[in-house]
Image (cartoon, rainbow, N blue to C red):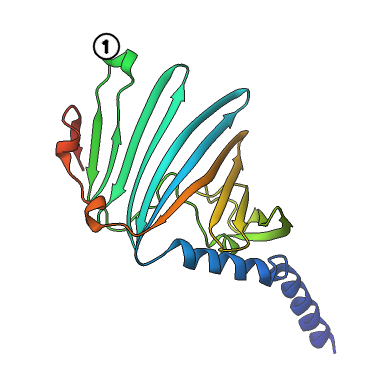
Amino acid sequence: MKKLILLLVVALTTTNIFAQIPEKVTEIMKKCEEVMENPKGLETDMKLHVGVMVISVNGTMKLYSKGDLERSSVKIKVLGMEMIEESGFDGEYEWEFKKAKEKSKKKGTEKDSLIISKPDKKKKGEYSVDLGMDKDYNKATLKEKDNLYIITFSELKNPKDEDLPKKAIIKINKNNYYLHEFEAKAKGATMRLTATKYKIGVSDDVFKLDTNKYPDAVIVRK
C-alpha cells in the first residue's frame, strides 16, 4: 500500500510539472515553426530594440533562412554612430562581418573585420529565435489579444543554460502563424524583434560567401 501511495504521489507530481506547458502552446509553436521553416526559403524584415538600464538602442534586421542556410544583416545606431553587422552560414562556412565605426576608422584605430570558420556543427545565430522553446522551459502561459497568441515562457529546465533568456515572450499571428514579435529579458536587459515584412522564396546564391563584397575588411580564417 505504501508503494502504491508513493507511486501515485510521484505520478501526480510529474503530471503537474509537465502540465505547466499547455498542449495548445506546444501546438501553436509547432505550427509557427512549420511556417517559418518554409522549404522555399523565407526573407524577413524586422525592427530591433535593445534596452539596458536607461540606454535604448533601435535598429533594423534582415534575415534570410532556408533549411540550415542562414544570413542576417543588422544596422543599429548608437550615440550617433551606425553599427553594421552581417553573419551567415552557407552550408560549409560560417562568417561574421563587422563594419568599423566611422569615428574610429578616421582615427585609424579600427578596421572592418570578416571572421570565417568551418564549424563541426552550425551554431544558433545571435538573433535567432528558438521556436522549440516549449522544450526548454518548465512553464508557459497563453493569452490571446489583437489577433495574436501571446506566449510567455519562464523557469528554464536547465538554469545554467546561458544561451536562453530567463524569460521570453513570443507573439504569433493567429491567422497565418507567422512570428510577429519576440522579446527576451535577462540580467537587466531587454531585446525585442518585431517582424514588419515576410517574403517566401530565397535563392541559394543569397547565402554564398563572397569576400569581394568586403574589400576593406581584415579577413581572419579559423
In this image, 190 relative to 108: left or right?
right
Viewer can see residue 91:
no
Pick whichever, 114 or 151, lies toward us: 151
In this image, 81 relative to 24: left or right?
left
In the figure, residue 12 lies in which quadrant? Answer: bottom right
- The structure residue drawn at horizontal position 27% and vertical position 19%, both measured from the top left corner, is 110
**What x and y, as percent, mark residue 135?**
57, 65
**What x and y, as percent, mark residue 182?**
57, 48
**What x and y, as percent, mark residue 195?**
51, 47
Quarter that holds the C terminus? top left
The single residue placed furthest to the top in the displayed view is 107
Pick whichever, 167 or 13, lies toward us: 167
In this image, 182 relative to 124: left or right?
right
- The structure residue drawn at horizontal position 25% and vertical position 27%, both measured from the top left corner, is 112
Viewer can see residue 183:
yes
Q: Amino acid at mark 1?
A: Lys
Element carrying mark 1: helix
In the figure, residue 106 lies in which quadrant? Answer: top left
List the residue tagged with mark 1: 106
- The structure residue drawn at horizontal position 47% and vertical position 48%, both measured from the top left corner, is 197
- The structure residue drawn at horizontal position 54% and vertical position 33%, both measured from the top left corner, is 50
**What x and y, as percent, mark residue 179?**
54, 55
In the image, residue 150 above or below residue 60: below
In this image, 167 relative to 196: left or right?
right
